[in-house]
Amino acid sequence: MATTGMPIIMTDTLSTPALLRLAAWMSPAFPIGAFAYSHGIERAVHDGDIAGRADLRNWLADLLTIGSMWNDAVLFAESWRRAGNGETLDEVAELGEAMAGAAERHLETMRQGSAFLAAARAWDTSGVALPAEAPLPVAAGAVAGAHAIPPEAALAVYLQAFVTNLTQAGLRLLAFGQQDGVAIVAGLEDTIADTARRAAGSSLDDLGAATIRAEIAALTHETQYSRLFRS
């Protein structure tokens, strides 16, 4: 499958240290336990809403544009701005926590957020005024903002890491292989870039989602008898 036609533009706005930090923070090897969560995809597979590669790609595209990933991107951008300005993030952290509409979604974002902050202390995070626990997009956005990493680039890499992790969950649940998984990530490149661009200029007024079946899947996963993932 051919990759997308999005042009590659060389720019000096992302410094080498910023690039290295993004690569580290959003790497699958960064110890936040993301592999343990499917974000409701396991239930969607169980119910037949996701039956193959095309279904998974469409599901992820909806999460990016009108679902939980869009809301996370808005929270990330707001956290980036507040941390960059030296403001406290208690309010946006509370909002992000309140927006986790299922117990497992709450567990997913809060556990990963706490783990992200703990691991990110290998770098200087003294300027990040976060509460002891914060949702993942708030934690990641605040750390990126405190390090003055350009917001659109930080958002794009964050969203791609999210998509890649959920694609890997799909690989464990569905009958397709690594090549198909890579094709999903490549096929969503334009969508990720566009979502990052829109979110970088967003405000909290832009929060909102319309992925009802994804939210139901997150809720009903809590009572699923046999499961591989924590969400």
Image (cartoon, grey):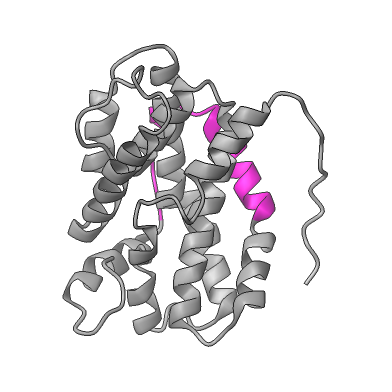
43 with respect to 177 (left or right)? left
Q: Quadrant of residue 221?
A: bottom left
Q: Quadrant of the C terminus?
A: bottom left
Outermost front residue? 122
**Up-down: is 50 above or below 213?**
below
Q: Where is residue 224? Give x, y as percent.
A: 21, 79
**Residue at 29% across, 28% down:** 92
**Residue at 41% across, 43% down:** 71
Q: Quadrant of the N terminus?
A: bottom right
Q: How many marks?
A: 0
Q: Where is residue 7? Give x, y as percent.
A: 83, 44
Q: Quadrant of residue 152?
A: top right
25 with respect to 14 (left or right)? left
Q: Viewer-proximal residue, 39 or 47? A: 39
28 with respect to 96 (left or right)? right
- The residue segment tinted magenta is 189-210
Residue 202 part of the magenta segment: yes
Q: Viewer-proximal residue, 92 or 13? A: 13
Residue 138 part of the magenta segment: no
**Up-down: is 13 above or below 167?**
above
Q: Where is residue 60? Give x, y as percent.
A: 51, 62
**Residue at 41% across, 84% down:** 48
Asked whether residue 207 is in view, the answer is: no
190 with respect to 28 (left or right)? right
Which secondary structure type mostly characterizes the magenta part of the structure?
helix
**Residue at 60% across, 37% down:** 20
Asked whether residue 182 is in view, the answer is: yes
Q: Where is residue 209? Give x, y as percent.
A: 39, 49
**Up-down: is 185 above or below 22?**
below
